[in-house]
Amino acid sequence: MLEQYKLVMPKTVYGGQNAINNVREIVEDVKHVAIFTYKSVYESGLINPITDILSEKNIPFTLFEDLPVEPTYLQAQEVVDRFNSSEADFIIAVGGGSVIDVAKLVSVLKTDRYTVKDLLETPDLAKKTVRTLMIPTTAGTGAEATPNAIVTVPEKSLKVGIVSNEMIADYVILDAEMIRNLPRSIAASTGIDALAHAIECYTSKKANPFSDLYSFGALELIIKNIEAACDGDMNAKSNMLLASFYGGIAITTSGTTGVHALSYPLGGKYHIPHGISNAIMLMPVLRFNEPYIRPLLANAYNRLWPFGNIENDEEKSALVLDYIERIIKNLDIPQSLKSFGINEDDVDELVKGGMEVKRLLVNNMREITEADARSMYLQVL
Ligand SMILES: NC(=O)c1ccc[n+]([C@@H]2O[C@H](COP(=O)([O-])OP(=O)(O)OC[C@H]3O[C@@H](n4cnc5c(N)ncnc54)[C@H](O)[C@@H]3O)[C@@H](O)[C@H]2O)c1
Ligand SMILES: [Zn+2]
């Protein structure tokens, strides 16, 4: 556990029923809004309550309704350029991690002094010039809470995180109506992403008292709600949105580990959606880490399943891992790389890509060598 730690968070977070109505007070001193979203969300009418408020208050807005899913850094730069030729002085991002991450980058790129590519090399250049409101429509990445923006770098066949506290949201709205009609498969895979954030941050070398509070809070909410949320229960969905946000806070003060590190090349080269690639890598990495994180998993057992009379840490830890594995299976998330056209010949490149994600590998309690990474990719072929 770290001896020194810090937590930076969005300034104002609104949650609960009809939380979306808080847009009214947030935009009080705004001159011109840019609304960032993508097609599925635009077509579902989810931004209507926002545009209604803006129209009622006579605040002009420009719609960017075609943002890319899992953007490359060049696609993110294109949005920056379009935004910079608009009149907008405030961004409302309504979408999953893909939309929110682009909004974060744009918020520090109303300048001609540096580009997204420059931030990949030198994130410290970032200076916020545009305020942001993030409204997640998946639960999820927790991107609305974090200082990270993840972009694909095709030259490296990798996803890379740009991290700067300057990109943290000014406002966040967590309103479960935004995820009411999320297709089950997306609810399932994005929910497992949140689960990965919770358990990785809880078992990370960077875990600390702040992250423990949030990662454990997220873990508990997810274990108790993910299946009901995927089956449409609104109370469970509301809890998942909260859990996803908690997971984001945990990422900010702790950090994800081997699961996310090994999943990045799956997204970067083979375009497997972020939630699915984490769902595929979660169990192999947790089982590999188990001897090193056993007391933590046993502690999770004690807190989440207090009725059992098992004394032995090894047994408790095995039960927790079996439970998580069962949840992933029940949610019908693809579990093999072959279903994405990946085979033995691709494993060398996956290993090379995974080993490059040192930013996250260093957080893993058990050192992951090239041979270990290879063995874990082979397990999920
Ligand atoms: N910044 C961070 O801290 C952080 C953390 C984890 C992941 N990420 C990044 O976030 C991205 C993934 O984000 P995501 O998992 O939220 O998904 P996403 O934003 O990529 O969206 C996934 C799909 O869901 C659809 N969708 C989203 N909301 C919907 C809704 N309410 N109704 C119907 N369809 C909807 C989208 O159109 C898209 O096709 C990846 O690029 C990942 O690397 C960022
Ligand atoms: Zn993630």
Image (cartoon, rainbow, N blue to C red):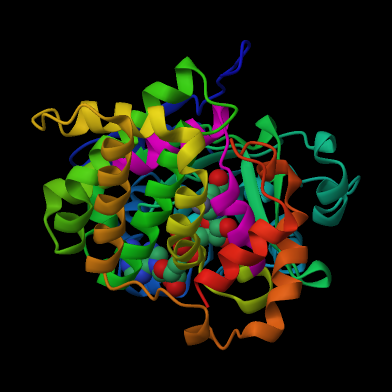
| Quadrant in which residue 246 is drawn | top left
Q: In which quarter of the image is residue 131?
A: top right
Q: Where is residue 376 in the image (x, y as percent from the top left)?
A: 57, 63
Question: Is residue 292 placed above or below 37 in the rendered structure?
Answer: above
Which residue lies at the image location 61% right of the left edge and 65% below the top edge?
A: 375
Q: Can residue 95 be seen in this view?
A: no
153 is higher (above) or lower (below) than 24: below
Q: What's drawn in magenta, residue-wise? A: 241-265
Which quarter of the rendered picture does the N terminus lie within? Answer: top right
Outermost residue toward the left?
307
Report x, y in % for residue 92.
49, 49
Answer left or right for 227 relative to 342: left
Is residue 216 visible from the viewing direction of this image?
yes
Q: Which residue is nearer to you in this view: 138 or 178?
A: 138
Query: Is 338 placed above or below 258 here?
Result: below
Magenta-highlighted stretch: main secondary structure? helix
Q: Where is residue 78 in the image (x, y as percent from the top left)?
A: 74, 67
Q: How many labels, in total?
A: 0
Can residue 261 be found in the magenta stretch?
yes
Is 25 inside the magenta-drawn segment? no
Residue for point 45% across, 51% down: 287
Which residue does the image show at 28% across and 53% down from the upper left? 322
329, 26: nearer the viewer: 329
* Residue sitting nearer the eye, 163 or 356: 356
Q: Is residue 189 left or right of residue 344?
A: left
Residue 125 falls in image quadrant: top right
Residue 175 screen position, x and y as percent? 27, 45
